[in-house]
Image (spheres, coloured by chain):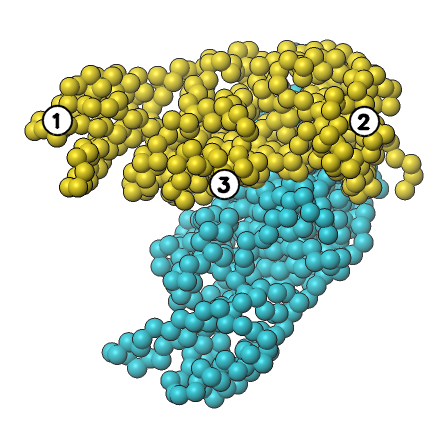
Chain colours: A yellow, B cyan
């Protein structure tokens, strides 16, 4: 074929993902050009330290420490920001946009906190920010939300969007590991950071949730208003009681339309073994989307890792190179910079079923006291599980109660009251139980 | 906002899907325009009979029996072909393209048989054919293959792409129904056609497989060369023996790259209960894709039905309306009209595990004869299952053998030889066993 159009690329940040993107852009350049129909030459790799780049045997001629020079090159149209964090990364993205360059990023924290602002600037400068890799790695959830799903009314999304947490929960559930052991193994295998706080506390999932919810619901959601609870306080024995009852625990990122309002939350949840997300194990991610016309669709794949995340970055580079991201950004009305603030419901308005574990003294009348507290808060008991005590230990045996659907605010009041009962020896453990979302294909509100 | 661009639409064929598309385009017109940023007015519904259109209370002013007039309208840019079949539909699509219109179609048979020819004409006429709805209903598998996956080397696809078959197999497996009963229920629920031949014989799945494989492997695959075996001859007792061994049966559409060649086949397969496709039940579809960089991604949703299929059609209309399908068609090198014929491997070259059920006389030495036949063909036995005979019946008890991986041609020879043994009383039943595809993220051949 004739000489191809060239769209020059600069990568800023040559860590795990940046290194993989550089490898693919250079080592698979011919195949990529042949497939996409546009040449996307890598012009420079910007970083302060090239140790990892050298390990990967990347071309040293591409190494560059002068960010300004790389960004303003005339033969560069796309800046790939893979620095991470919200300070330097924000400056880099803003600088690239201001220089009239398109940006591709995997930075969920940046978008969750500053997405609207950066998208507004990009729109004014007639550039785009592409961010498929920011949510769930290789899973094309962002392009799906900008494709067929952008033509539908989305009612709910349920995601397992943090591979570290899902790996740890799978190890705890299937291999009876403790949280601490599972985390150590995950760290040893490169599936968890040395400081895993952002992952295990649910913050990373909430970053992704706000990005996806903005597009799905066409409103500006606020990360700060998302209810976030991590997996770091989960105990193995609750996972085991759940198993006994037919449930597995997952860290779910949930977004639901409720009338004109939106409920966003991240927390561990018991889901039935037959729930469509129950089989998603190890470091994999999956996102269930419920659309008015499309019904339930689900997207599954690797949510992290060098090559899978790089695949999403490369997909974005190609989509910008052929101009499709630009058209979507200019035409579709899914972008949060074009929309109003969402009416985000407080978690106290959530209705779901609850798993409660109580460590109570064994006296006559104990259960009556507990039952009265629940009844006073309009909470119906669905099941009770209490094993015979071990005779050889003195330990009191916990009582596990599952409820029918109840209001979160009522459950919180009940838990507070139960914790104040003199027969209750440890704070009550409370885990939400999430049912499969009803599919309402073909019905209108 | 200011007055919007208008992209006029004509629907040809107002059946189940056509009716739903017309409903969405008219009843949800304002929302759709607001979301997509382009107005997509429905200009006409072409059919010979408007009984269904009237049932749906569609605007009678849109009803039109003059196809030529509708296609050539100046205020129409997109013709939606939902007639089905390969004769009239082909004429309609060719006529629309020739008139310079873009085509959106859900017609897998048409594309499987005449896709290359029609795409070539469309390319010459500078129009496009969009066909998301042709494969797996609401699942955005075609856009995914044209998105991130188009930048990757795809090594394999495994799909459950026929909802009728999956519904029947789920009913047989989970509710112990016979094939005939499950089919009757499916027909009563509108999940199977009055004449279910195309579905249950696997032909429909093969249509979809050739369409997806063309894009994934960037080669022209031939429907006629696909090995196709349906579910219509499956017996409930094999499903039950499989269950006992830890397997469920699914009708799989499989496409694998093997060196420079491609293996395409549709057949019932036993997959482990832990296989990523094992949980896909009822009328749902799912497609697993294995990419070099992206790894294993999976796409799940409703493969049929009025609204889910209509959602895919609407997504295509919108993508054409904003111009993205045109760019993908012009730029990406995934289209079969641009590629060479695939080297399609014969099914005899397939290597997998096999389930064999033998009805043998109970004599000393019977098993030795069978074992010798298998050994002669280099087939190793993995497990043997034979229950004690029922004392109250005279019936001989079948022997179920599972093999290690073996060459299909060898297994066929072995089955022929076993069927000729005087101790074998009924033809041997042979069902392929498909393991989870290895994910080779980050490795190159």
| Residue corresponding to mark 3 | A282
Q: What residue is rendered at 42% in x and 15% in y?
A: A345
N-terminal-most mark, 2 or 1: 2
Q: How much space separates mark 3 and mark 1, taking CA atoms?
A: 40 Å
Q: Secondary structure at mark 2?
A: strand
Q: Is residue A259 above or below residue B372?
A: above
Q: Position of residue A4 (x, y in %)?
A: 88, 35
| Residue corresponding to mark 1 | A366
B61 displayed left or right of B430: right
Residues under numbered marks 3 and 1 in contact, where contact means CB atoms less than 8 Å apart: no
Q: Position of residue B356 (x, y in %)?
A: 48, 71
B73 displayed left or right of A361: right
Q: How much space separates mark 3 and mark 2, taking CA atoms?
A: 35 Å
Q: What residue is rendered at 54% in x and 21% in y?
A: A207
Looking at the rendered structure, which numbered label has been put on residue A428? none
Q: In terms of image quadrants, where is residue B377? A: bottom right
Q: What residue is rendered at 17% in x and 41% in y?
A: A392
Res. B35 in view: no
Res. B382 in view: yes
Q: How much space separates mark 2 and mark 1, taking CA atoms?
A: 70 Å
């Amino acid at each position: 074929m004739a000489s191809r159009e060239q769209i020059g690329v600069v990568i800023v940040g040559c860590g795990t993902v940046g290194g993989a993107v550089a490898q693919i852009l250079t080592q698979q350049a011919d195949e990529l050009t042949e497939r996409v129909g546009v040449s996307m030459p890598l012009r420079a790799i910007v970083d302060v330290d090239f140790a990892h780049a050298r390990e990967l045997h990347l071309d040293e001629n591409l190494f560059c420490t002068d960010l300004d020079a790389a960004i303003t090159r005339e033969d560069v149209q796309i800046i790939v920001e893979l620095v991470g964090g919200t300070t330097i990364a924000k400056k880099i993205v803003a600088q690239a946009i201001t220089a009239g360059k398109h940006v591709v990023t995997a930075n969920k924290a940046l978008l969750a906190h500053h997405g609207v602002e950066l998208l507004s600037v990009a729109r004014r400068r007639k550039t785009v920010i592409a961010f498929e890799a920011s949510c769930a790695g290789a899973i094309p959830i962002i392009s799906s939300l900008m494709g067929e799903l952008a033509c539908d009314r989305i009612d709910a999304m349920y995601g397992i969007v943090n591979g570290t947490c899902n790996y740890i929960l799978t190890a705890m559930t299937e291999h009876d590991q403790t949280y601490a052991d599972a985390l150590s193994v995950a760290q040893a295998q490169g599936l968890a950071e040395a400081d895993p706080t952002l992952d295990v506390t649910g913050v990373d999932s909430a970053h992704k949730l706000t990005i996806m919810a903005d597009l799905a619901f066409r409103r500006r959601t606020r990360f700060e208003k998302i209810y976030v609870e991590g997996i770091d306080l989960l105990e193995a024995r609750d996972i085991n009681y759940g198993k006994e009852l037919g449930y597995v625990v997952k860290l779910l990122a949930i977004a639901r339309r409720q009338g004109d309002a939106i409920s966003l939350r991240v927390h561990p949840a018991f889901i039935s073994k037959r729930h469509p997300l129950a089989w998603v194990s190890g470091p994999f991610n999956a996102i269930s989307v419920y659309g008015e016309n499309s019904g339930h669709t689900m997207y599954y794949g690797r949510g992290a890792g060098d090559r899978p995340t790089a695949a999403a970055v490369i997909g974005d580079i190609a989509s910008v190179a052929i101009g499709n991201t630009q058209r979507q950004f200019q035409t579709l009305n899914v972008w949060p910079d074009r929309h109003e603030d969402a009416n985000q419901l407080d978690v106290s308005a959530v209705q779901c079923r609850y798993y409660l574990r109580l460590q109570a003294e064994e006296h006559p009348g104990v259960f009556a006291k507990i039952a009265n507290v629940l009844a006073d808060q309009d909470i119906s008991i669905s099941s009770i599980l209490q094993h015979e005590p071990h005779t050889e230990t003195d330990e009191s045996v916990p009582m596990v109660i599952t409820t029918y659907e109840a209001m979160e605010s009522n459950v919180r009041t009940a838990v507070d009251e139960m914790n104040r009962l003199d027969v209750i020896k440890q704070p009550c453990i409370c885990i939400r139980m999430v049912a499969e979302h009803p599919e309402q294909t073909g019905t209108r509100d």
